Image: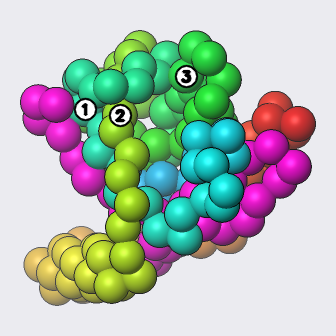
Amino acid sequence: MTDTTSIIATLAKTTENYAVYESADVGGTQELTGMYVSLAAFGESPEEFIEVAIGEEGPVALVKNKDTTNYGVYESESGAISGSYFAHDVLGSEETDDGESAPEERGISISPATEEDFEEAQDEMEEEAEALLGEMGDDDAVEVEETSEEDEAEALLEEAEAAAE
């Protein structure tokens, strides 16, 4: 794959047919949330942690279902992967008059990861967030309504769960 971004995700839950993965939540922001992967892809049991590499190309093609305020929503044509909410920052989305517009297609690969990988990714995200906040002076501070983002994420997960069932 060329020009890829790697995301370490953890198994959030399983449904009758899917393993659901999410990346670390840092400051109310996630790179990946609600990625439904068919249990058939894992054989006996799903991996506890996975690394998702997403870019322009990859062994599995994802097609955009829609855009939300913070995420591009993707699924594979076969349905083995669905309800995958990738943050616009990860996708390199374009700013339009109607908000962010994610690319129509992305390629991904999925490989096993460890808890240590997940914790390292979370630490890196926290360090980046702290560095960005440190660069901002009091005059640049922006108030963020975390409840609205949390509500959106919860609504997105519920929507993804309904679509997957």
Residue at which label 2 appears: 108
Asked if the magenta segment contains residue 25, the reply would be yes
Mark 1 vs mark 2, foreground winner is 2
What kind of element bears circle 3?
strand
Q: Are marks 1 and 2 in contact (CB under 8 Å)?
A: yes
Mark 3 vs 2: CB contact within 8 A: no
In this view, 142 is above or below 51: below
Tell which residue pokes out farthest to the front in this image. 44
Compute the Cα span from label 3 to label 1: 14 Å
Query: Where's residue 153, x and y in %?
Result: 66, 56
Q: Secondary structure at mark 1?
A: strand
- Dividing the picture into quadrants, the one containing residue 141 is bottom left
* Amino acid found under the numbered disc labelled 2: Ile
Few, some or many residues within 10 Å of mark 3 (<14, 14–19, 20+): many
In the picture of the structure, the residue carrying the numbered disc 3 is: 76
For marks 3 and 2 on the same chain, the one whose residue lies earlier in the sequence: 3
- Residue under label 1, please give it: 55
Colour setting: rainbow
Q: Which residues are magenta?
A: 1-27
Q: Is residue 6 left or right of residue 70?
A: left
